[in-house]
């Protein structure tokens, strides 16, 4: 039986596909998401230089895609469905949050700034808000018993931004 590799095979494949796309000039929302995931993975492995580079590319691409601007403020801009607007808002705030976290961790200046033209801090689908929070048990078990509690995932995330 093979030992667990922590998803290294998938990360290697993702990097290969990512750089193929970037070399062809392809710039999409999944490209940005891939860069964020690779950044988080590299950070988790202690590879801070790679994490910083991947996140930096992601932040430049959201600027290139116009995700860092609230397009609904401007008449005549590209018409997007409510779902597309929600995806873009979530992606912007995820990048914004990750930028602050990785910059703080590495002692560097953040790249993304919250301005008057930034997407609003509104998440339309807040279904995760009322899900039950479940504690992560330690491998040794826990004598702590927590009563069921609402997770408040969405409001906690937006407050962190």
Image: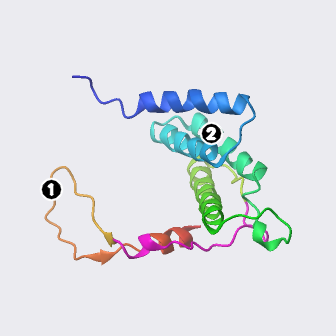
- The residue that appears at 56% across and 30% down in the rendered structure is 15
- The residue that appears at 79% across and 69% down in the rendered structure is 117
Q: Indicate the colouring scheme.
A: rainbow
In the image, taking residue 43 as reference, residue 107 lies left or right, namely right
Residue 38 position by quadrant: top right
Disc 2 + disc 1, Cβ < 8 Å: no
In-front residue for pair 97/58: 58
In the image, taking residue 127 as reference, residue 4 lies left or right, namely left
Magenta highlight: main SS: loop
Q: Residue furthest top?
A: 1
Mark 2, other Cα within 10 Å: few <14 / some 14–19 / many ≥20 = many
Residue 1, above or below 52: above
Element under disc 2: helix
In-front residue for pair 27/104: 27
Q: Which residue, given by chain and number where applicable, does mark 1 sit on?
A: 141
Measured as percent of width and height from the top left, residue 140 is found at 15, 51
Measured as percent of width and height from the top left, residue 136 is found at 27, 58
Quadrant location of the N terminus? top left
Residue 38, above or below 150: above
* Cα separation between marks 2 and 1: 37 Å
Q: How many marks?
A: 2
Q: Which mark is residue 8?
A: none
Q: From the viewer's perspective, is the residue at label 2 or at label 1 nearer?
A: 2
In the image, taking residue 122 as reference, residue 24 lies left or right, namely right
- The residue that appears at 62% across and 51% down in the rendered structure is 103
Residue 52, above or below 10: below
In the image, the segment drawn in magenta is 113-131
In-front residue for pair 30/42: 30
First along the sequence among labels 2 and 1:
2
Q: Which residue, given by chain and number where applicable, does mark 2 sit on?
A: 54
In the image, taking residue 65 as reference, residue 142 lies left or right, namely left
Q: Is residue 142 magenta?
A: no
């Amino acid at each position: 039986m093979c030992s667990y590799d922590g998803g290294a095979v998938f990360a290697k494949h993702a990097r290969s596909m990512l750089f193929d796309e970037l070399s062809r000039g392809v710039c999409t929302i999944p490209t940005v998401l891939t860069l964020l995931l690779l950044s988080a993975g590299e950070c988790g492995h202690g590879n801070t230089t790679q994490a910083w580079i991947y996140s930096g590319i992601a932040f430049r691409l959201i600027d290139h895609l116009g995700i860092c601007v609230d397009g609904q403020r401007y008449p005549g801009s590209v018409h997007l469905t409510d779902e597309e607007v929600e995806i873009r808002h979530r992606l912007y705030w995820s990048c914004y949050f990750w930028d602050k976290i990785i910059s703080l961790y590495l002692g560097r200046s953040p790249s993304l700034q919250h301005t008057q033209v930034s997407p609003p801090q509104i998440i339309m689908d807040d279904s995760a808000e009322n899900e039950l929070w479940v504690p992560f048990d330690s491998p040794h078990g826990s004598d702590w018993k927590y009563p069921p509690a609402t997770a408040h995932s969405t409001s906690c995330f937006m407050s962190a931004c």
